[in-house]
Image (cartoon, grey):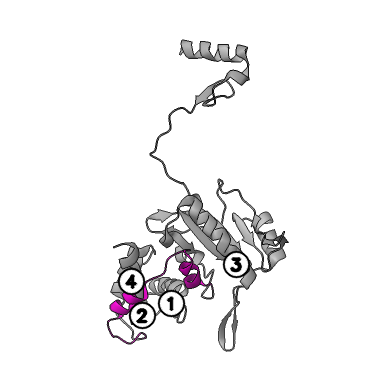
Amino acid sequence: MNKFVLFLAVLMLAGCSTAPNNLSVKNGYAIDTTHSSPNQNERVRYLVLHYTVFDDKDSLDALTNGTASAHYLVYSTPPTHHALPVALQLVPEAKRAWHAGVSQWGNRTHLNDTSIGIEIVNAGFIDGPTGRLWFPYTEAQLALVKQLAADVIKRYAIEPQNVIGHSDIAPLRKSDPGPLFPWQAFAEQGIGAWPDAAMVHKHLAGRPASRQVAVGTVQRALATYGYKIPQTGELDEETRQVIRAFQMHFRPAGISGIPDAETEAVALALVEKYYP
Ligand SMILES: [Zn+2]
């Protein structure tokens, strides 16, 4: 200890220019970074995608003046800088943004602690006389989200099954980013998870895709994959909401929340691929 203090005193007398690069003097102490442990990983483990429900202006207002936030906001038609599309960063990646709320994925809760959140400007849906209508994303914003997501995933080595929507981690409260978000096209470019068609075919085992099935297998498969879902063997309301969230992500052609053979096959194929 005394030798170290002496060392610091000598350093100070000698001036900062002689301080080794691995030693930095703080307020009343110093830090030595000579030894680095390999036993570490990124705090960020998840990427969560959202839609905002508002237009550009109101989205920015809600995420900067309200009680929620996200690391990034992507406008409906992103502005450009030297022909490059621009995303707004509202919160530094090293900080917690408040985008996930009460949430769970696998055995991890409070996803704000461990995720990056991207909010995409989109009005969500309206319920009309012919049913629910979802608003499409623009090609320009999807192109930007793709680049941004790929960059985040690469920097934190986020696993495909941990690239998720808000509705995946809060299925009883949220529907974003909705069934029109192109998860399959993103997965085909290395962003997020998607089942292999051959595995889905195998698990379908010749059954008609729309045939309703017993819910127990779907409940077990979705829980293994990451969803918080009851294990009741019953199609209770909570189970139905979670299945609906799963369908919005992985089988958007039908999002009734009814467990059918295709939903079961897709769920089993995902488990086989990502949790063998
Ligand atoms: Zn959201």
Q: SS of the residue at dot 4?
A: helix
Label 2: few (<14), some (14–19) or many (≥20) C-alpha neighbours in 10 Å: many
Compared with 242, 6 (above or below) is above
Query: Mark 4 — residue?
Result: 269
Label 1: few (<14), some (14–19) or many (≥20) C-alpha neighbours in 10 Å: some
Q: What stretch is highlighted in magenta?
A: 181-210
Q: Residue 143 carries which label?
A: 3
Query: Mark 2 — residue?
Result: 262
Q: In which quarter of the image is residue 194?
A: bottom left
Q: Tell whether circle 4 marks a residue whose Cβ is less than 8 angstroms from ligand 1.
A: no
Q: Nearer the viewer, residue 80 or 136?
A: 80
Instruction: Give the CA separation, mark 2 to mark 1.
Output: 8 Å
N-terminal of the pair, mark 2 or mark 1, is: 1
Instruction: Give the CA separation, mark 4 to mark 1.
Output: 12 Å
Q: SS of the residue at dot 2?
A: helix
Marks 2 & 1, CB-CB < 8 Å contact: yes
N-terminal of the pair, mark 2 or mark 3, is: 3
N-terminal of the pair, mark 2 or mark 4, is: 2
Label 3: few (<14), some (14–19) or many (≥20) C-alpha neighbours in 10 Å: few
Compared with 23, 39 (above or below) is below
Q: In which quarter of the image is the N terminus?
A: top left
Q: Which one is in front in this view, the residue at disc 2 or the one at disc 3?
A: 3
